[in-house]
Image (spheres, rainbow, N blue to C red):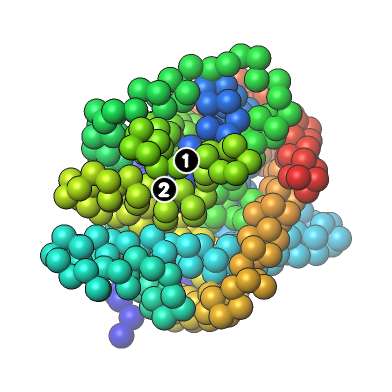
Amino acid sequence: MAPKDATNERGQFSSRFGFITAATGSAVGLGNIWGFPTQTASHGGGAFVLVYLVLAFLLAYPALMAELIIGRHTRHNMVGALPQLTTKPVLKIIGRATGLYGVVIASLILSFYAIVASWLMAQVPAALADISGQGQTASWLSQSSLLRDSLFCGLFSLLTASIVARGVKDGIERWSTRLMPALVLLMLALVATVLTLPGAMEGLRLYLVPNFSLITDPGLLTGAMGQAFFSLSLGVGTMLIYGSYVSKTDNLPLTGAYVALIDTGIAFLAGLLIIPAMFVAQHRGIEIYSSENTLIAGPDLILQTLPSLFNSLGSAGVIIGLVFFLLLTIAALTSSISMLEVPVTFVLEQFQLSRYRATWLVASIIFGLSLLILNNFEQLFAGVISLTTTYSQPLLGVMLCVFAGWVLHRDKLLREISAGFAGAENSLFWKIWPSYIRFICPLLIIFMFVQNARS
């Protein structure tokens, strides 16, 4: 039986805090927790942090505002929103095709994201089994296998769908306002613990002290632009959908700035945790550099290097490991909620299904895709990631900037920004942003796309 509020009517966030926690939750995912810290270490430490913080507001914030403005102006899913911005038939077709592609890409991202989340989620009961002395169970849970990964992928998908099925206010907003504060508190506790361990200060120096000679390095600039853009969950319509649930009385430029600021703050916190932890591991004799003399990153860091550190800390390390993987599971869940909302909203509005039915239908299809990838892992996993994140997200981001800057009429744009923002036409935001989103943002994203495609 569907929950009481699972209708095909559009929802709305009940407060600015609700939207900010939901949007920040969408932005703060696994890429922030392990992607940002390892990119930082691989590109000059503090120099990368400095450039990232600048580009987060020069590149990511304007693109974020494009999605939020389109979403609130149209009050529609991505497929329906872009054609509403124009009366020209050709642009309507392009807008609809762009929206449909965004829905497909969001679904594909979630299909592999749920697999990665399952690896991390399994480590939580593994740590509990270890604490309770169930060594054989802990060993099975901590080691990847088709059965284990399928089981936990299904469980993660079930959790995500159960939240989305309850709607915007009772599902997404309610759980975001609980999960995000929990994530920040867990991260602060882990940072405080790791910084007391031998070796942490060496990592802290690498992280916080910039080498200014590296700031003009092309690899550093490209990496920082990519991280700034992707860390805010841009390009596939998640922020457009969330923007469509924002009240007309909210000041969008200010609210968007809060989201960008909190997201970059949590990414910074993640670096404050991971980089010192890696050097604590090195202090204990654990290898943190690969054969190419670069710091170990990605799954190898999260599932091998850091667990080795936790094991070396004895019983305290088991508790730290439990909290760490619980933190990662929460981060994954807050992002997966927003990704599932993209195709769910499309199905809900396009086919007039109830939210409950739309959610479980879409979640089942995406879980089927996850199982397909798991059963053909070597052939599909890396290819799906490359197709979605390296190639599709930047191109979709460019299209959203073009529709916000060139297609949406300037008077309508100002009217939407002015809702909840008195005196918008005289603000610095209005003087800079329209031109910025027309020219600078698309060019920067295309540059990032070309550099990523070459590498």
Q: Is residue 315 left or right of residue 162?
A: left
The answer to whether residue 206 of the structure is visible from this angle is: yes
- SS at mark 2? helix
- Tell me the residue at 64%/51% (across/down): 235
Q: Is residue 94 left or right of residue 165?
A: right
Contact, mark 2 vs mark 1 (Cβ under 8 Å): yes
Q: Amino acid at mark 1?
A: Ile
Foreground of the two, 78 or 133: 133
Count the labels in the image: 2
The quadrant of the picture occupied by the C terminus is top right
Residue 379 locus on image (x, y percent): 67, 73
Q: Amino acid at mark 2?
A: Thr
Q: Quadrant of residue 449?
A: top right
Q: CA distance from mark 2 to mark 1?
A: 7 Å
Report crowding for label 2: few under 14, some 14 to 19, many 20 or more residues within 10 A (C-alpha): many
Q: Is 198 situated above or below 318?
A: above
Residue 207 locus on image (x, y percent): 46, 25
- Tell me the residue at 29%/55% (across/down): 326
Mark carried by residue 305: 2
Q: Which residue is mark 1?
A: 288
Residue furthest toward the front? 285
The quadrant of the picture occupied by the N terminus is bottom left
Q: Is residue 34 left or right of residue 213?
A: left
Residue 28 locus on image (x, y percent): 44, 46
Residue 245 locus on image (x, y percent): 46, 54
Q: Is 320 situated above or below 170?
A: above
Mark carried by residue 34: none
Compare marks 2 and 1 and give the one earlier in the sequence.
1
The answer to whether residue 63 of the structure is visible from this angle is: no
- Tell me the residue at 41%/48% (across/down): 305
- Tell me the residue at 28%/61% (across/down): 124
Foreground of the two, 396 or 269: 269
